[in-house]
Image: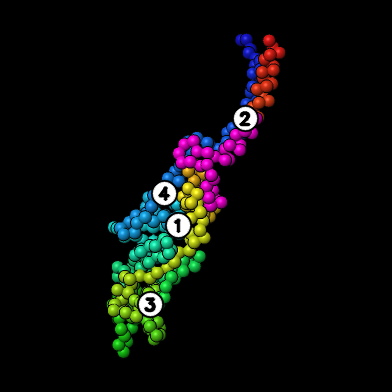
Amino acid sequence: MKRQYLSKTQILTVLCLALILPSILNLPPVLGVSNEPYTSCGSPFNCGKIAGIGYPFWGGGRPEECGHPALKLGCENGTTTIQINNVKYRVLDLNQGTQILKIARDDLSRSLCLQEFRNTTLDPVLFEYASGYVNLTLLYGCRALDFPVPYQFDCPVKGVSERNGYVQFAAELSGVCHASVVFPVSYTSFLDLKGLAEAVGQGFDVRFKVGSDGACSECESSGGRCGYDVAGKEFVCFCPGGLAKANKTCPSGVVAGAGSYSPRASAVAPSASSGTQPCLFVIHFHERNLE
């Protein structure tokens, strides 16, 4: 069997390819860049009367990278919901201009009789109370009292025979009860308290802090769309062409769609092309000598 050997020109070609292929493969794509985050984060959240909601919220048609992980909105039968510290709330109003969120506890809005007794707490990094409020304490599984108490209610408590429930104001009644829940109501609702269900249903205002630094406004002004890097735990600006910039703004010259200008790509491309020039010269020189 006759053996076949590579010519010197073929050997040089293989060696040159081995040198330049790594730099070519590491080039970022210039054409056909993925626009998925930029496109998906342009879709607002809509549910019932809560509509046109963008960053820092996500949920519905907005994927996770379009908002802060803790600010996911849900939609249940036309009602917008949000989970805060493992407690579900109904979103009664959401004003992104003032960053005010009016919420009401979903469980208490359905019934004062609860399966789990969890106090309302806010993550101080994400939220703060936006207006005057008063904490109400509902007491469950209480012994019967010898004196009248306003807003008394009746609810079963698992493993307890007592069914009396009370609202604790100034008097200390927790010693005669088995469970309690603390939740805020607006000061206005408290002054005009006609019933517990009404006070719960009116909700209370909180201010969300995410997005208050102006980074999202700068991003949008540069043609980008606001998002969140879940891995890096920081704000990110999605730009046309799929460029994600943590410096808050999109580079100038970027145009939506395929063929978008990429500064990084244009900076790296010359190095790859310059690496091919010596190889081409050597191969051409060697071929001329063979002639």
- Give the residue type at disc 4: Gly
User: Of 117 and 246, which appears nearest the observer?
Assistant: 246
Above or below residue 191? Residue 19 is above
Bin the neighbour count of mark 1 within 10 Å (Cα to Cα): few under 14, some 14-19, many 20 and up: many
| Marks 1, 4: nearer the viewer | 4
Q: Does the residue at mark 1 contact the one at mark 3 (Cβ under 8 Å)?
A: no
The residue lying at 48 percent from left, 43 percent from top is 240
First of labels 2, 3 by sequence position: 3
- Give the residue type at disc 2: Ser
The circle drawn on residue 273 is: 2
* Residue 54 included in the magenta stretch of the image: no
Q: Where's the N terminus, which quadrant?
A: top right
- Give the residue type at disc 1: Pro
Q: Is residue 77 left or right of residue 94?
A: left
Q: Does the residue at mark 1 contact the one at mark 4 (Cβ under 8 Å)?
A: no
Whole-number angstrom distance, CA of label 1 to CA of label 4: 12 Å
The picture places residue 88, in percent across and down from the top left corner, at 38, 64
In which quarter of the view is residue 87 placed? bottom left
Whole-number angstrom distance, CA of label 2 to CA of label 1: 42 Å
First of labels 1, 4 by sequence position: 4
Q: Report which residue position mark 3 lands on.
A: 187
Q: Report which residue position mark 4 lands on.
A: 42
Above or below residue 244? Residue 188 is below
Q: What colouring style does the render use?
A: rainbow
In which quarter of the view is residue 107 placed? bottom left
Judged from the image, the secondary structure of the residue bearing numbered disc 4 is loop
User: Of 119 and 249, which appears nearest the observer?
Assistant: 249
Residue extent of the magenta highlight: 245-274
